[in-house]
């Protein structure tokens, strides 16, 4: 259940809170963002943090919390380790800044890598299922 807190430490269930959810500062962590549907303002801003090896599914779940992306804004941030991964995977020169297309390319390469690394286990599970059932 969603909870709402203020800077004095008071906490309420969302439906009992004295302010509307669209007026709240909302934090979606990875474990709780799938399926969440908070009613945010049309001009809301989100900070999307990139993690090592982030895949398309995870970034889409994160960005998808913003339901009105034509008017809402997402700022993408990352630590030095992720920055370095993006630079290397995109062959970016040191005087070139990272653009959103570099991030998308890095995410897609991570997604392909994750699918490749899980392919053998998937095939083995499928084979076991066919033999068992």
Image (cartoon, rainbow, N blue to C red):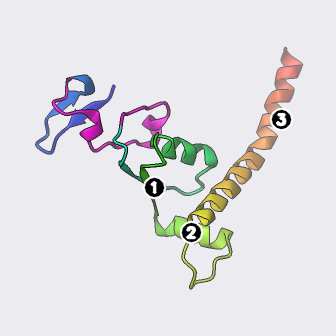
Other-residue count near label 2 (Cα within 10 Å), few / some / many at <14 / 14–19 / ≥20 = few
Quadrant of the image occupied by residue 86: bottom right
Other-residue count near label 1 (Cα within 10 Å), few / some / many at <14 / 14–19 / ≥20 = some
Q: CA distance from mark 3 to mark 1?
A: 33 Å
Q: Which residue is mark 3?
A: 123
- Report the predominant secondary structure element of the magenta stretch: loop
| Residue located 55% across and 48% down the image | 59
35 relative position to 56: left or right: left
First in residue order: circle 3 vs circle 2: 2
Q: Which residue is mark 2?
A: 99
Q: Which residue is mark 1?
A: 49
First in residue order: circle 2 vs circle 1: 1
In the depicted structure, whether residue 54 falls above or below residue 87: above
15 relative position to 111: left or right: left
Q: From which residue to which does the magenta span run? A: 16-39
Q: Residue furthest left?
A: 8
Task: Tell me, for residue 4, which label it has, or none.
Answer: none
Q: Nearer the viewer, mark 2 or mark 1?
A: 2
| Residue located 73% across and 51% down the image | 112
Asked whether 18 falls inside the magenta stretch, the response is: yes
Quarter of the picture containing the C terminus is top right
Whole-percent x and y of residue 89?
67, 68
Q: Nearer the viewer, residue 74 or 26?
A: 74
Q: CA distance from mark 3 to mark 2?
A: 37 Å
**For numbered disc 3, what is the local secondary structure?**
helix
Label 2 with label 1: CB-CB less than 8 Å: no
Whole-percent x and y of residue 55?
62, 49
**For numbered disc 1, what is the local secondary structure?**
strand
Asked whether 78 falls inside the magenta stretch, the response is: no
Quarter of the picture containing the N terminus is top left
Whole-percent x and y of residue 37?
42, 31
């Amino acid at each position: 259940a969603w909870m709402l807190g203020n800077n004095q430490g008071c906490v309420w269930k969302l439906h009992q809170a004295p302010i509307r959810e669209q007026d709240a500062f909302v934090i979606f962590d990875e474990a709780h963002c799938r399926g969440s549907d908070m009613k945010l303002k049309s001009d809301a801003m989100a900070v999307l943090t990139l993690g090592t090896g982030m895949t398309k599914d995870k970034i889409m779940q994160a960005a998808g919390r913003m339901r009105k992306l034509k008017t809402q804004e997402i700022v993408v941030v990352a630590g030095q380790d992720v920055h370095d991964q993006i630079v290397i995977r995109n062959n970016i020169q040191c005087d070139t800044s990272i653009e959103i297309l570099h991030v998308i390319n890095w995410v897609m390469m991570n997604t392909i890598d994750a699918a490749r690394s899980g392919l053998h286990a998937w095939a083995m599970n499928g084979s076991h299922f066919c033999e068992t059932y």
